[in-house]
Image: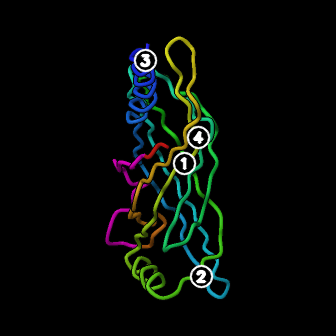
């Protein structure tokens, strides 16, 4: 009886942990159309659109994303947070998310952050980090659901050119096609 209980616990743990390693996030496309600071008020005006693919590679289990938020950070400051609609994802399925960050925020830059911004402004290409986080559940074959898990996808540094750039040395493209893999943690 003891061996049966231990085996059952091992199966439950296996079914709860292994499927979570089959979740993949990739930034596939990004476009930055506004990114400027109003002098005197230190207000950053920004407009950034990002396409992110979410892949469920599990053969039998679906995923319910109960809550999802995406945030962007640059020069050591959080500049935008967007809540995305909850969704269900079937097994062996890829979902494309379109996330738009648009608005303004106070951005007082000093020291190395100010030097980095000035260099990026001269190069007309900005350093931006994209992250996603939220809650998910697994949908078992047969209809059962797991407990809720927290997840975080860190997509890392994106170097994005400003599309409305006045640069004549390069052709300005509508968006930057990427295949940036995000590091996913589930806990």
- Crowding at mark 1 (Cα within 10 Å: few <14, some 14-19, many 20+): some
For residue 66, side relative to residue 167 (left or right): right
The image's mark for residue 135 is: 4
Q: Are marks 3 and 1 in contact (CB under 8 Å)?
A: no
Question: In the image, what residue occupies the spot 58% across and 78% down?
Answer: 37
Tell me the residue at 64%/77% (across/down).
43
Are the residues tagged 2 and 1 within 8 Å (C-beta)?
A: no
Q: Splitting the image into 4 quarters, where does residue 118 fall? A: bottom left
Task: Report the number of discs.
Answer: 4
Of the two numbered discs 2 and 3 on the same chain, state the one appearing first in sequence: 3
Q: CA distance from mark 4 to mark 3?
A: 34 Å
The residues colored magenta run: 167-184
Q: Who comes first in sequence, dot 4 or dot 3?
A: 3
**Residue 2, labelled with which disc?**
3
| Residue at position x 57%, y 23% in the image | 145
Of circles 2 and 3, the one toward us is: 3
The image position of residue 96, as x and y in percent, is 48, 37
- Between the residue at mark 3 and the residue at mark 1, the CA separation in whole angstroms equals 39 Å
Instruction: Give the SS element for disc 4.
Output: strand
Q: Which residue is mark 2?
A: 108
Please rate how many residues cluster around mark 2, counting C-alpha atoms within 10 Å: few if below 14, some from 14 to 19, many from 20. some
Residue 116 drawn at (x, y percent) = 42, 80
Q: Mark 1: which secondary structure?
A: strand
Q: Residue at x 38, y 20 (%)?
A: 59
Front position among marks 3 and 1: 3
Q: Quadrant of residue 24?
A: top left
Q: Does residue 180 lie above or below 97 as drawn?
A: below
Residue identified by numbered label 1: 133
- Earlier residue among tags 2 and 1: 2
| Left or right of residue 142: residue 7 | left
């Amino acid at each position: 009886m003891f061996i049966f209980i231990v085996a059952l616990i091992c199966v439950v743990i296996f079914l709860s942990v292994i499927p979570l390693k089959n979740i993949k996030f990739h930034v596939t496309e990004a476009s930055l159309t506004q990114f400027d600071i109003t002098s005197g008020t230190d207000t950053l005006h920004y407009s950034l659109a990002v396409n992110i693919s979410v892949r469920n590679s599990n053969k039998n289990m679906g995923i319910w994303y109960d809550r999802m938020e995406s945030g962007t950070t640059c020069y050591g400051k959080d500049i935008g947070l967007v809540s995305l609609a909850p969704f269900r994802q079937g097994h062996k399925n890829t979902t494309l998310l379109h996330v738009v960050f648009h608005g303004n925020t106070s951005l007082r830059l000093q020291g190395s952050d100010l030097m980095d911004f000035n260099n990026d402004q001269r190069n007309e290409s900005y350093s931006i980090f994209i992250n996603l986080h939220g809650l998910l559940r697994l949908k078992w074959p047969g209809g059962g659901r797991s407990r809720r898990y927290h997840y975080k996808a860190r997509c890392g540094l994106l170097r994005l050119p400003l599309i409305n750039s006045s640069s004549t040395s390069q052709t300005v493209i509508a968006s930057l096609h990427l295949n940036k893999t995000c590091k996913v943690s589930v806990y």
